[in-house]
Amino acid sequence: KQEVTQIPAALSVPEGENLVLNCSFTDSAIYNLQWFRQDPGKGLTSLLLIQSSQREQTSGRLNASLDKSSGRSTLYIAASQPGDSATYLCAVRPGQAGTALIFGKGTTLSVSS
Amino acid sequence: GAVVSQHPSRVICKSGTSVKIECRSLDFQATTMFWYRQFPKKSLMLMATSNEGSKATYEQGVEKDKFLINHASLTLSTLTVTSAHPEDSSFYICSASQIAGRYTEAFFGQGTRLTVV
């Protein structure tokens, strides 16, 4: 059974710092992996999608990497800003295109000004 | 990215009544939608897979008679919480995947905060 773990559970940093959020999964046979952002009481916003054949994806200050063989992904946030404060969720799609995502518990990030 | 719209965003209902939540894919068709439930400080837990034109597939432990799912068109799935009780109070969120060849990306609705009093 696929399990997704995110470390750390919470992180507080001052504005301007670069930071890394970690995600690990137990079964390397994934279709793809997505990183999401969730603000309190809100839905999920897709940040980055990495296909199983890809090693990384970049969008603005965000960079996500994928090492499928070791079951790991990282989300790198450069030059953090207070507006980055949110919960970041990692999710894997096992096996096939039509299957549901399996989520980690998330990392709650707080960036202070 | 694609847009998934969920309505209502918040609902308060009396114990024993039913509540319907709508999930629409606005700019793409989705043969499959997913319904999740999120408890405070917990991850999203898959409740059921909604299939257009056929019965939904429920995860173990989810009561199909309590959480009725209808996927009547390629852009609309509904979740009805029947005979709601306070323990059904939670954050419910739907998802639809946009599939283009080998590219599949999931998009989520805004979520619905259900409070049963």
Image (cartoon, grey):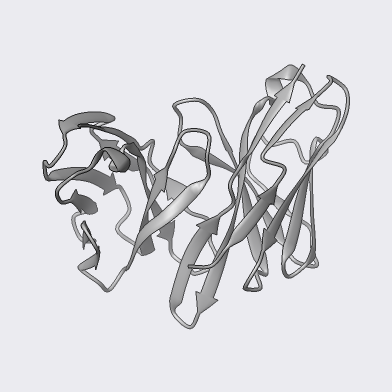
> Farthest residue in the front direction?
A113
Q: Residue at x 73, y 18 (%)?
A: B86
Point out the image quarter for the C terminus of chain A: top left
Give the vertical position of B17 relative to B43 (above or below). Answer: above
Q: Position of residue A39 (x, y in %)?
A: 44, 39
Q: For this view, does A26 lie left or right of residue A95? A: left
Picture residue at 66% right of the left edge, 67% below the top: B26
Res A1 visible: no
**Labels in figure, total:** 0
Residue B67 placement: quadrant: top right
Task: Residue at 16% x, 45% y: name it.
Answer: A20
Rendering coords of residue B4 (x, y %) = 61, 59
Q: Residue furthest bottom?
A: B101
| Left or right, residue B116 beside residue B113 | right
Who is closer to the viewer here, B22 or B47?
A: B22
- Of residues B62 and B4, which is closer to you in this image? B4
B32 lies left or right of B64: left
Q: Position of residue B7 (x, y in %)?
A: 71, 47
| Coordinates of residue A16 in the picture (x, y in percent) | 12, 42
Residue A91 makes an appearance in the image: yes
Q: Which residue does the image show at 21% across and 57% down from the upper left?
A: A61
Give the vertical position of A50 relative to A76 (above or below): below
